[in-house]
Image (cartoon, grey):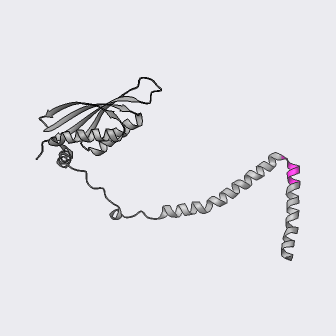
């Protein structure tokens, strides 16, 4: 307890000296001393961190054998076989259209009829089935439908989307989606 009282006595003259210095020197000098003390404290705080960073940088890098190597890119033939494996079968095209209508119903869209057109590319042996769908519903529901179609039918492509609204305040949007299904002949 006596030591605690002695510390107070030693601290009191220091505080008095600081107070007198502040009154004599003015605000600018006090600010300069405070900034100097803050800089000194920051430097003292950053010094151990800098040493830790230098220690981290001094460590050797792992050997190349421990690093994971990326697999080689697929060859052209592998890409081509993957492309043909992803195509849908032509004989199930009507079922895919039914899937589109089901997804539109789940998204709360009005889908009455569509336009359908088959095309065959002799060079690739791929049949494209182009479907134009006029739909009515809310803007988010139309986009939800389009994204669900692409997720549910991996061989479908969303070629075009166009929107139309009669008035700005109208919550119902008319949209026309053009979707192409890429199909192969069934085995």
* Range shown magenta: 20-26
- Which residue is the extreme one toward the bottom? 2
Q: Main secondary structure of the magenta part?
A: helix
User: In the visual, does 60 lie left or right of 11?
Assistant: left
For the N terminus, give its image quadrant.
bottom right
Q: Residue at x 27, y 35 (%)?
A: 179
User: In the visual, does 160 lie left or right of 84?
Assistant: right
Q: Residue at x 52, y 64 (%)?
A: 55
Asked whether 27 or 149 is in front, the reply is 149
Can you give x and y, in whole percent of width and height, for residue 57 in the image?
Answer: 49, 61
Can you give x and y, in whole percent of width and height, for residue 71 in the image?
Answer: 27, 56
Q: How many numbered circles are shown?
A: 0
- Name above or below for residue 1 compared with residue 20: below
* Quadrant assignment, res 91: top left
Asked whether 179 or 169 is in front, the reply is 169
Can you give x and y, in whole percent of width and height, for residue 53 in the image?
Answer: 54, 60
Can you give x and y, in whole percent of width and height, for residue 90 in the image?
Answer: 15, 40
- Which residue is the extreme one toward the top? 166
Asked whether 99 or 156 is in front, the reply is 99
* Quadrant assignment, res 19: bottom right
Q: Residue at x 31, y 41 (%)?
A: 103
- Name above or below for residue 110 compared with residue 60: above
Q: Residue 80 in magenta?
A: no
Q: Residue at x 25, y 54 (%)?
A: 72
Q: Residue 25 in magenta?
A: yes
- Name above or below for residue 26 compared with residue 6: above
User: In the visual, does 38 lie left or right of 162?
Assistant: right
């Amino acid at each position: 307890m006596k030591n605690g009282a002695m510390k107070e006595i030693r601290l009191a003259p220091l505080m008095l000296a600081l107070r007198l210095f502040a009154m004599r020197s003015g605000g600018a000098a006090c600010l300069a001393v405070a900034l100097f003390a803050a800089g000194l404290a920051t430097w003292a705080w950053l010094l151990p961190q800098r040493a830790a960073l230098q220690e981290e940088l001094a460590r050797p890098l792992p050997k190349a054998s421990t690093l994971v190597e990326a697999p080689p890119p697929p060859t052209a033939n592998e890409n081509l076989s993957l492309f043909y494996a992803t195509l849908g079968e032509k004989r199930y095209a009507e079922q895919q259209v039914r899937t589109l209508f089901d997804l539109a119903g789940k998204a709360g869209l009005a889908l009455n009829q569509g336009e359908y057109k088959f095309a065959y590319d002799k060079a690739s042996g791929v049949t494209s089935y182009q479907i134009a769908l006029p739909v009515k519903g809310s803007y988010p529901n139309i986009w939800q439908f389009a994204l669900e179609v692409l997720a549910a039918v991996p061989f479908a492509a969303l070629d075009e989307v166009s929107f139309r609204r009669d008035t700005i305040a109208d919550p119902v949007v008319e949209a026309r989606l053009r979707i192409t299904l890429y199909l192969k002949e069934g085995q």
